[in-house]
Image (cartoon, rainbow, N blue to C red):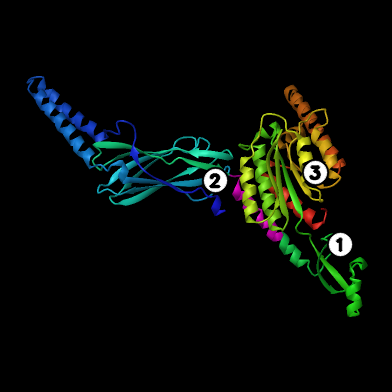
Amino acid sequence: MDRLVPASVTATARNAGRIPFAFGRRFFLLLFIGLAWIAPAWKEPRFLYAMLLWDLLALFFWAWDLSRLPRPDQLEVRRVWKEPLGLAQKSDVTLEIRNSSRESVAIQLTDEPPETFCPALPSLTLVVPAASSASATYSIEPRERGAAKCGNVWLRYCSSLSVAERWACADLHQDLRVYPNLGESQKMRIYLIRSRQIELEKRLKRQRGHGREFESLREYRAGDEYRDVSWSATARRGKLITKVYQIERSQTVWLVLDAGRLLRARVDNLNKLDHEVNAALSLAQVALYSGDRVALLGYDRKLQQRVAPGRGVAHLRALIESFSQLHAVSYEADHLLATKALLSAQNRRSLIVWLTDFAETAATPEVIECTAAIARRHLVLFGVMAQSELRALVAKRPASVQEMYRYSAALEIVQRRDLLLRQLRQQGAMVLEAAPAGLSTALANQYLQVKERSLI
């Protein structure tokens, strides 16, 4: 994943604005001290000349301090990223300053990250010694996937005297890409490791339904099925020889993601599409490391993203790039368009993992009609997010008239939803309903069960 980390950018500072300098805070302290001449000036006006002379000295001192400050081109600013940008993942951004002058400076840095990274502009303070460098770090937490842009870094620096200060700017404009939650997908590898351990434990004791892909030959053992006997090998060796099978590899898994209006609803500070993308990425990693080929189809009224089946690290990177560009729209998705595109792209039987949501209406959703067409050729697994709040409301007995109306409305929605899920199962599809936080785990477990039972 190192190639997903944004590149570090470096720029030499330049003057900020037409007047890139100002008075420091201690300059105003000197002026305030000069006001002490006002008291004797009430009796002797000549002391006003002394106050004026003091102010001129303060101004001269300010000009001298300003001349000591490094020029902007003697400061080099660098923005460093240490990890990929993942949705709702906290990460650090480091700003490094290289001071090539002979004077030490105290610098206040203000970066311009995207608004979705942090609620306010980060402001950092650090001291950079002469002919040396220093760095400071601030935290970000992206709240939206997709393209983002960073702006300039603004510098406000002064010497140790703090009488004069300069303003500078470093042009560190940078295009960024926010990916799905990569940390969650990494955790799914645990399920793959465990599944491989189970396969190794059962290698000497294969059972029906654990795969029909040929692995090796061995002598017949009591309990082996006669249909697994290799009669050609038996004839050559003069004793019964049994074929050993393993879970099929090199199969195709299609991840179909609905990006319609229903997926804009927010759950746990993320919209439903974000939860779907995180779960799909987790499943993609498990499937790729299991040896299967993974494809992607994201759609609304048009096909937003489409990645052909493939495997390998380069293919995983292509999937991550496509996942990051999926976005929910404000209108209903065209499920028939997705069905036609899927059936035309995949002829051989495969696993279709369809992540969507349903509107609990009296009319039959279009997606149920599409399921009937796909299930004739492929194994379809629907992943939907459970409405835990509504089911919790239905589980309680109403205690007032107002709660009774809320109970009735929630009960109607839950019943319609259960009816839709039942219709999907009747069409031959598998349906998985899970909470948003547990969707990734549920999909990985269901995928491993499908592989173990050789349902594809």
Answer with the quarter of the image where residue 367 lies.
top right
Is there any visible trace of residue 240 in the rendered image? Answer: no
- Residue 208 numbered tag: 1
Please, what secondary structure does the residue beneath circle 3 have?
Answer: helix
Instruction: Please state which amino acid type lies under the numbered disc 3.
Output: Leu
Left or right? Give the position of 277 relative to 30.
Answer: right
Please, what secondary structure does the residue beneath circle 1 have?
Answer: loop
Instruction: Please state which amino acid type lies under the numbered disc 2.
Output: Leu
Who is closer to the viewer here, 329 or 109?
Answer: 329
Q: Position of residue 266 (x, y in %)?
A: 64, 34
Answer with the quarter of the image where residue 399 lies.
top right
Q: Position of residue 194 (x, y in %)?
A: 70, 60
What main secondary structure does the magenta stretch of the protein show?
helix
State the extent of the magenta-drawn residues as a range. Answer: 179-194
Membership of 180 in magenta stretch: yes
- Identify which residue is drawn at 29% across, 31% down: 19
Q: Which tag is nearer the camera, tag 2 or tag 1? A: 2
Who is closer to the viewer here, 398 or 296?
Answer: 296
- Residue 85 numbered tag: 2
Left or right? Give the position of 74 relative to 89.
Answer: left
Membership of 201 in magenta stretch: no
Q: In the rendered image, which residue does mark 3 sit on?
A: 343
State which tag comes first along the sequence, 2 or 1: 2
